[in-house]
Amino acid sequence: MTTGPGGRAHWLTCALDGRDHAVVDHDPDSGAHLSACARTVWASSLASPPAQRCEDCATATGESRAPERPSLLGRLRALRPA
């Protein structure tokens, strides 16, 4: 599997399924990415917040468990003044 600098996978949020996938290859002609779980990933806006990671990609990259990310509501609640 191809990984980025330091041996870490590049994670992109898929515009189709809304999950983060570990990208292992990129087709510059079509803009599609191949993920570690063998799905074709179409990147959503790179300005969008990270999503929940694909369990199959996490397993394929050697992660024991995909890290839990707070929900949008949880992130908004954290922004409230004390």
Image: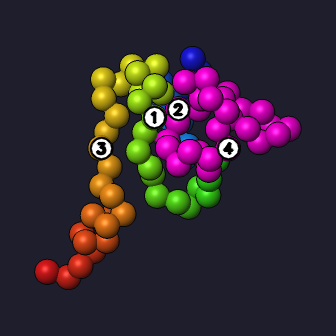
Circle 4 sits in a helix, a strand or a loop, which is it?
Answer: loop
The disc labelled 3 sits on which kind of residue? Glu
What residue is shown with label 3? 68
Rate crowding at label 1 as few (under 14), some (14 to 19) or many (20 or more) other CA atoms within 10 Å. many
What residue is shown with label 1? 54
Residue 57 lies, in percent from the top left, at 48, 27
Circle 3 sits in a helix, a strand or a loop, which is it?
Answer: loop
Q: Is residue 28 left or right of residue 43?
A: right
Q: Are marks 2 and 4 in contact (CB under 8 Å)?
A: no
The disc labelled 4 sits on which kind of residue? Trp
Q: Is residue 64 left or right of residue 31?
A: left
What residue is shown with label 2? 22
The residue stretch that appears in magenta:
14-42
The disc labelled 1 sits on which kind of residue? Cys
Rate crowding at label 3 as few (under 14), some (14 to 19) or many (20 or more) other CA atoms within 10 Å. few
Q: Which residue appears at 35% of the width and 25% of the height?
A: 63
The image quadrant where one finds the C terminus is bottom left
Q: Are marks 4 and 3 in contact (CB under 8 Å)?
A: no
Residue 60 lies, in percent from the top left, at 46, 19
50 in relation to 35, above or below: below
Q: Is residue 48 magenta?
A: no
Instruction: Work out whether mark 2 precedes mark 3 in sequence or the reverse, and give the earlier one.
Output: 2
Q: Quadrant of residue 59?
A: top left
Q: Which residue appears at 46% of the width and 25% of the height?
A: 56
Rate crowding at label 2 as few (under 14), some (14 to 19) or many (20 or more) other CA atoms within 10 Å. many
